[in-house]
Amino acid sequence: QAHLDRIAAVEGDVHAFLHVNEAALDVARQVDADRASGEALPALAGVPVAIKDVLCTLDMPSTSGSKILEGWVPPYDATVVARLRAARMVPLGKTNMDEFAMGSSTEFSAYGPTKNPWDLTRIPGGSGGGSAAAVAAFEAPFALGSDTGGSIRQPGAVTGTVGVKPTYGGVSRYGAIALASSLDQVGPVSRTVLDAGLLHDAIAGHDPRDATSIPDAWPSMAAAARDGASGESLKGLRVGVVRELDGEGFQAGVRQRFHETLEKLAAAGAEIVEVSAPNFQYAIAAYYLILPAEASSNLAKFDSVRFGMRKDVAGGTVEDVMGATREAGFGPEVKRRIILGTYALSAGYYDAYYGSAQKVRTLIQRDFDAAFEQADVLVSPAAPTTAFAFGEKLDDPLAMYLNDVTTIPANLAGVPGMSLPMGLAPEDGLPTGLQIMAPARHDARLYQVGAAVE
Ligand code: GLN
């Protein structure tokens, strides 16, 4: 009830939700009743959680921020949603996002932008701005996001919340409306590192319905956070500072907080080493070929027949109806990426664009391999600047894409990354975020280090 009251009080300003679950109180009451009757319940039973609209929910519309899916209610739950229900958490509603998770500001949502609770004239990050803003504004204590190139971590950085992109394959993608299947991961959003660990534990683990799901068992992330909180585990830990992610293009106050954090880590006994990842400079270029290529294929299913919207054309052929539906249903950024991806995949250009981008991806993976020989974790700012103003980058796709420079490498390599608050930037009083990255399957290290510096 407290969270529903908070939503009623601030949603007019923040607009974090696309849908609020009318059944939330009933679900919560059932948990209370079961607890009263002596049933043993999981740790997060009865705790509300907001769900990014990219995730399929049986009982609520799932639009992925697009008009083409307006009002569409899926016939099944995403595996992560089913796991939240099994953990007896209370789904509070669906959160706003850039259309099909393409963007860094939520300005590309077909349903209007979410505002940053710290300053309503600024963006909450994207694409998962709704989940981050809901948690930052105390509308929800927990949320789920999805991160293809930073959509959990960058909103975390600019709203002062914690967000984690797990190792690729660590959390099921079944029922997550695909953007770029080789990059997408679902992960937790919260206000503390321990909370993120609790939610991560609830959603992680093998899912036979996702062919890329890792079959092995995972250690408890919450236990790693509890273990890390004393700071003991920092002693002798090698923390690698990625030279290419600390310098030109980064806001002064973000760099200041980042270097203070490094001093804090060193004071607690960590060994700070500088590492170089020379191919990270090509990450954005490679990503903006690989992502549109995969997205153009994934979005082909929105064909006016199988899902959502249909624009009829009198006397028209099926192609006419399909064209009219996609013209009306997709927004400008989605169209831009479908065209780019289709072009990059076309015969004659495939090797030059998609093939080259895949080679760069391999080089970036090798940069990570080399860096992790010198360091146990890597750190950088989670976003190059604090929250920017609405409209600032809307007409300049490249400026918007450059914002992803810190987060994209982890998706290209499949390694896990966490964003957590590192204080307010002195020049504008807005949140800054630290990013921690670890080798694939070593997500627990993020929690250990994150809890120590939080
Ligand atoms: N900002 C990135 C993009 O626009 C990230 C998207 C994401 O992680 N879903 O592609």
Image (cartoon, rainbow, N blue to C red):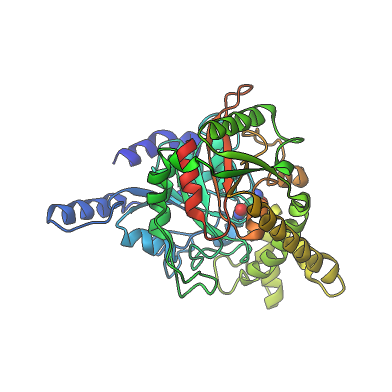
Residue 6 placed where, x, y %? 37, 36
Q: Position of residue 414 (x, y in %)?
A: 61, 60
The image shows residue 397, relative to residue 452, as above or below, that is below
Q: Which image quarter: residue 307?
A: bottom right
Residue at position x 65%, y 41% in the image: 273
Question: Taking the image as drawn, is residue 323 in sight?
Answer: yes
In the rendered picture of this protein, how many numbered marks are placed on residues?
0
Q: Position of residue 377 (x, y in %)?
A: 58, 48
Residue visible at 75% across and 47% down in the picture: 397
Residue sitting at the far bottom: 317
Instruction: Tell me if 412 is positioned left or right of 164 in this view.
Output: right
Say above or below: 187 vs 207. Answer: above
Location of residue 3 by image quarter: top left
Which residue is situated farthest in the front direction here?
236
Q: Quadrant of the N terminus?
A: top left
- The answer to whether residue 63 is seen in the rendering is no
Rendered image quadrant of residue 42: bottom left
Q: Nearer the viewer, residue 265 or 325?
A: 265
Residue 293 as seen in the image, left or right of residue 5 = right
- Looking at the image, residue 358 sits to the left or right of residue 328; the answer is right
Instruction: Give the x, y percent position of residue 91.
Output: 36, 53
Kindly give the residue lying farthest to the left in the view shown.
37
Q: Along the line of sight, which residue is nearer the eye, 50 or 438? A: 438
